[in-house]
Image: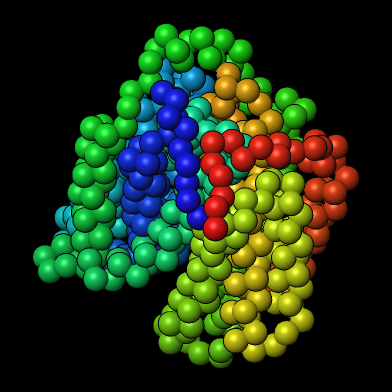
Amino acid sequence: MRMIVDPSPRALSRLSFATLFATTLATAIGNMGLISVMPAAGRELGISDFLIASIFSLSALMWAVTSPFWAGRSDRKGRKPHILIGLGGFTFSMLGCGCVVLAGLNGLTVPLVTFAGFLLIRSTYGTFGSASGAAAQAYVADRTEGQLRVRAIAALGGALSLGTILGPAIAPFLILPHVGLAGPMFVFGIAGIGILCLAAIVLPSDRPGEIARQHTESSGGWDIWRDPAVRPFLIYGFAMSSAQAANTYTLGFLVIDRVGLSPVEAQSSIGIAMVAGALAGLVAQWGLVGMCGMMPRALLRWGGALAFAGNVLIVALPGFLSLVAAFALVSFGYGLARPAYTAGASLAVGDGKQGAVAGAVSAIAGASIVVVPAVAVGLYEWMPALPFVVFGGVMGGLLIYAFIDPALAQREVADCGIVSCER
């Protein structure tokens, strides 16, 4: 497949997209790496598992709350400055958390002070890091059309999936002498500085006059949810992201119960299942979406159907290998549906609302992991099959929704935009 790029001034260059890809990949690796080492760090610091989880919940809440603000501001001030703000927030939070953890490990702070410091510094990522997520998507949307936009957004989603694989794989090797479990945070923070410098040098700046003309109709903040052309995609996205969060956060418990080993002994099995899911999502986003050029409506339907079927198989089939295969099928479905609702919402509006759409999509990513994981784990403790039945039902409902809602079933753009596929 050969990419033919439009030579117009607003086209997305390969170098610019590579920089955005690196930005997304680096933050995904850092965040997943941090999540993978924090349970062990919490035990070493004497902080309860619940309090460790609450640190990430607060950051996710701040992400959901601030994303629309940053998106609306990027409409007025430009995308590039907000990409840099987000990278700055990521870098500060990683280096700051590393300092807090290192102080705690060395006995310089008591557990309560360590927890409070970690909570406050990590929340800066949710507050400022959200600026780059929305701005990067809007930057792509400003410079692409049709199938190229779908593919570009899917490729950025693939960067998240790749980061999900690489983060937990890399983090154990970054537990370094003298800094211990704080090592991954320092390394990720230093890498963030490098990516920030790359983005500052490589990304073309937005032209203020052009931005002002393009975004006179901008509907920032939460007002975009009132747009009837966009709202169905956002509803689908929030429900789908919630189901995905429920599946992901209960997977480890189900693996432990299926293999019948202690939590420590089951870590390798959990890792196998998570990597299988991440690889399946990556294949969906980079393979099927990128090569076949499917448009949002078809992706929403196929994604909903496969995620529904995967949840059914998790409940119906016994054993560990069947669980891995079923979770991979679930993840493949989510890998199709995620770029579908994101690109569908973007294609449903003009240039003036791209920032608002990007902010809403970014807010969904944070909002879906504030409460849902706790609910899903609670359902699992009540009955192990229940979260997969409930959220599998959610995906079944979304499959029906994708067929009957007029906005989702409307005639789609057949034009390939500025891309043609040649074998």
Query: Residue 307 in the image: x percent, y percent?
Result: 70, 64
Tell which of 157 and 423 is nearer to you: 423
Its colouring scheme is rainbow
* Residue extending furthest toward the front: 423
Query: Residue 154 in the image: x percent, y percent?
Result: 54, 49
**Screen quadrant of the C terminus:** bottom right
Residue drawn at 77 percent across, 81 percent down: 316
Query: Residue 383 in the image: x percent, y percent?
Result: 73, 74
Query: Residue 132 in the image: x percent, y percent?
Result: 41, 36
Tell which of 262 and 343 is nearer to you: 343
Left or right of 126 in this view: 253: right
Vertical relation: 42 (above or below) 260: above
Tell which of 248 and 28 is nearer to you: 28
Left or right of 178 in this view: 155: right
Residue drawn at 28 percent across, 48 percent down: 94
Left or right of 168 in this view: 313: right
Left or right of 198 in this view: 323: right
Q: Is residue 89 visible?
A: no
